[in-house]
Image (tube, rainbow, N blue to C red):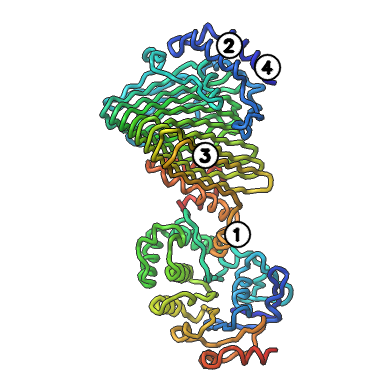
């Protein structure tokens, strides 16, 4: 699904990713963990194609295609979804209609007709119930006046409706209380499928109590310094990151 | 340029004065208006409160009113439900009839409109182009609402059909609401796409105690047209005047709005949206004058300038001595879309008394990069994403249009103005 080789990337002229290698096979859920400033969010934004994040070396392939050659909107239509750590509020742009436009953009890209309005709304309502979101969010602006937890749930709602092949969730757990965390985790788990992959970027392992990853990778100073199964996350919870930082140095 | 233009103005008046209808404005009054205008001179860019207006069209335009019959009319939008429509073409009544019980509509055709209590003498130098209207007006519409009447609405459509070389047009409107009455008015200015028309409108609003007027003003003139507009409102005690103005058309548009709150507890709110593109210059000068105690005003402006265009809002609030307990708010925002466009926001406040609450904010900036990327990351095309954000920017004003038929029409218009993708209509 996703193959990253020797990825180097800079932000504001400063190199953040320094030769990152990562392979996420189809159907698997991988977690990227690491201390603050290790490059986790940079990786997420590079994958989504955010302007200002410059790839200086290396390659990223998504379903065998060169992902870096695609514009941000093409990546989205091809099935890459970024769940933002800090989703923006866009007053005046209706939440649900943006979602519909996103679905139709992907459908048009695949040569499919537009989604039926009634079926779409039924689907959105169903997913909203799953995310325990209030119906009033249907008529509100994108994330407008949402609490931190509501914004994160809205990100997962979008993901559930868009059904991406690859979801990159950037610190989706940050700022969530335990109830919201469980709801978000449940949403993510329902999307697990043999033809989908997920990359969870997180600082703490508590999200991984609810979403069990196939692999855990530790990112330190722009490189993956260790990979393992879920027990690696537990080990990090006990020992912290310092031992890996000193090993990397 | 001014004296040469003024001489031409006088000559043109001399040539047509015999055919100007005395039933609209008497000959003596026209002559006085012209003299007053000539004494003041035409506005110029060096005048502080005209510096954002593109006045160049005045140098070449023909001032005498259009005399020819209009060719085919452009297609008109649906009449919003519950509204009686009156259509004026190049400044003359073309069609229209009827109004709700308690509402009287006078025009030059029906009776002597000059008898109405017009007071469009320009009190301010910013309002002096009302004198041009007074000199040349070929028709006038005076709408009177009897005391206690809760009327639905009147729609006034002014179509500029002729080119400026054939002459100008002078829409003239008076809205007079009796005590405790209520009225909604839609005022539209439309034009043929290619006609470089000169439209000089004058509107007078008189609100008796406890009267409530909702006034929608939609300016969608053709891309070559010029619109110079003057509106003067007088609010008695506890009167409420809500104005919603959307400007998207014309090459050069300037609107001067002066609301005088002379009765205790009167309220005036102005919400305006301007969408400028190409070489357009859209300028709005608004003066809210608090005269009586406990009066309230609000000014909201959202302006977008793209390419080489300009959107300007010059909003002045004056609190006179004795207007204690006044409350005034201004929220002005501009969005710049391009390196060569211009947004001018000028909040001004003059206070001559104590115990007032006045706030204002003015910001101008570019599209938010974070919002833009968020939309791209959801698969929205860059151009569509930009349009969507511009749309959202105007929403503070558009959302105030509670008349759903009109709101939909304006949304469609603005989307057209943004050369919008069909799919984005879905997003509304």
Pinpoint the chain carrying mark 1.
B
Q: What is the CA distance from the residue labelled 3 to the residue labelled 2?
A: 39 Å
Residue, disc 3? B349
Residue, disc 4? B3
Image coordinates for residue B255, horizontal then vertical, percent: 53, 31
In the rendered image of this protein, does residue A30 appear above or below residue B75?
A: below
Q: Residue B192: in sight, yes or no?
A: yes
What residue is at 63 percent from the left and 74 percent from the top? A42
Pinpoint the chain carrying mark 4.
B
Callout 1: SS? helix
Q: What is the CA distance from the residue labelled 4 to the residue labelled 3?
A: 34 Å
- The mark closer to the camera, 4 or 3, is 3
Image coordinates for residue A105, horizontal then vertical, percent: 53, 60
Residue A224 is drawn in which quadrant? bottom right
- Same chain for the residues at labels 3 and 1, yes or no? yes
Nearest to N terminus: mark 4 or mark 3: 4
Nearest to N terminus: mark 4 or mark 2: 4
Nearest to N terminus: mark 3 or mark 1: 3
Nearest to N terminus: mark 1 or mark 4: 4
In the rendered image of this protein, does residue A132 appear above or below residue B179?
A: below
- Same chain for the residues at labels 4 and 3, yes or no? yes
| Numbered circle sitting on residue B13 | 2
The extreme front residue here reads B354
The extreme top residue here reads B18
Cβ–Cβ below 8 Å for labels 2 and 1?
A: no
Q: What is the CA distance from the residue labelled 1 to the residue labelled 4?
A: 50 Å
- Same chain for the residues at labels 3 and 2, yes or no? yes
Residue, disc 1? B369
Characterize the local packing of mark 1: few (<14), some (14-19) or many (20 or more) Cα atoms within 10 angstroms. Answer: few
């Amino acid at each position: 699904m996703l193959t990253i080789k020797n990825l180097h990337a800079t932000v504001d002229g400063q190199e953040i990713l320094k030769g990152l290698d990562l392979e996420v096979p189809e159907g698997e859920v991988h977690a990227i963990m690491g201390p603050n400033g290790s490059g986790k969010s940079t990786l997420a934004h590079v994958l989504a194609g955010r302007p200002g994040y410059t790839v200086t070396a290396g390659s990223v392939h998504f379903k065998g295609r060169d992902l870096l050659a695609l514009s941000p909107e093409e990546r989205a239509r091809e099935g890459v979804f970024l769940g933002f750590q800090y989703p923006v509020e866009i007053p005046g742009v209706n939440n649900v209609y943006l979602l519909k436009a996103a679905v139709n953009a992907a459908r048009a890209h695949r040569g499919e007709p537009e989604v039926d309005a009634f079926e779409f709304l039924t689907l959105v309502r169903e997913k909203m119930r799953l995310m325990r979101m209030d119906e009033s969010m249907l008529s509100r602006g994108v994330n407008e006046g949402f609490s931190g937890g509501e914004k994160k749930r809205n990100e997962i709602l979008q993901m559930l409706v868009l059904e991406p092949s690859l979801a990159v969730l950037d610190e989706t757990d940050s700022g969530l209380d335990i109830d919201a965390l469980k709801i978000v985790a449940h949403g993510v788990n329902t999307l697990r499928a043999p033809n989908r992959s997920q990359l969870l970027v997180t600082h703490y392992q508590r999200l991984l109590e609810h979403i069990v990853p196939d692999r855990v990778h530790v990112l330190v100073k722009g490189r993956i310094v260790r990979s393992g199964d879920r027990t690696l996350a537990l080990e990090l919870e006990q020992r912290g990151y310092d031992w890996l930082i000193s090993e990397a140095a | 340029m001014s004296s040469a233009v003024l001489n031409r103005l006088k000559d043109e008046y001399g040539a047509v004065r015999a055919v100007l209808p005395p039933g609209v404005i008497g000959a003596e009054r026209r002559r006085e208006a012209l003299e007053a205008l000539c004494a003041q001179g035409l506005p110029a860019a060096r005048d502080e409160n005209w510096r954002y207006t593109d006045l160049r069209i005045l140098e070449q335009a023909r001032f005498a009113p259009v005399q020819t019959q209009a060719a085919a009319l452009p297609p008109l939008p649906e009449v919003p439900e519950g509204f009686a429509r009156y259509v004026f073409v190049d400044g003359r009544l073309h069609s229209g009839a009827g109004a709700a019980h308690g509402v009287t509509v006078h025009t030059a055709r029906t009776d002597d409109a000059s008898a109405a209590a017009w007071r469009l003498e320009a009190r301010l130098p910013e309002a002096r182009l009302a004198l041009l209207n007074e000199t040349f007006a070929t028709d006038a519409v005076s709408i009177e609402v009897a005391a206690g009447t809760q009327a639905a609405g009147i729609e006034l459509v002014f179509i500029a059909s002729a080119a400026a070389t054939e002459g100008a047009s002078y829409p003239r409107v008076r809205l007079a609401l009796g005590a405790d009455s209520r009225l909604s008015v839609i005022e539209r200015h439309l034009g043929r796409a290619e006609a470089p028309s000169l439209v000089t409108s004058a509107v007078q609003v008189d609100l008796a105690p406890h009267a409530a007027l909702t006034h929608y003003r939609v300016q969608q003139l053709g891309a070559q047209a010029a619109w110079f507009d003057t509106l003067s409102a007088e609010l008695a005690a506890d009167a409420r005047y809500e104005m919603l103005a959307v400007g998207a058309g014309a090459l050069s548009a300037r609107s001067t709005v002066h609301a005088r709150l002379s009765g205790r507890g009167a309220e005036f709110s102005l919400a305006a949206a301007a969408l400028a593109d190409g070489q357009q210059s859209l300028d709005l000068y608004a003066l809210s004058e608090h005269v009586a105690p406990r009066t309230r005003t609000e000014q909201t402006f959202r302006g977008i300038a793209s390419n080489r265009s300009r959107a300007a809002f010059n909003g002045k609030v004056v609190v006179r001595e004795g207007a204690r307990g006044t409350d005034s708010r201004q929220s002005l925002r501009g969005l710049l879309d391009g390196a060569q466009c211009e947004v001018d926001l000028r909040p001004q406040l003059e206070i001559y008394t104590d115990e007032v609450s006045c706030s204002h904010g003015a910001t101008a900036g570019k599209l938010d990069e974070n919002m833009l990327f968020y939309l791209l990351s959801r698969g929205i095309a860059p151009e569509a994403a930009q349009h969507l954000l511009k749309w959202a920017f105007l929403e503070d004003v558009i959302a105030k249009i509670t008349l759903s038929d009109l709101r939909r029409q304006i949304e469609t218009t603005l989307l057209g103005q943004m050369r919008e993708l069909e799919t984005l209509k879905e997003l509304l």
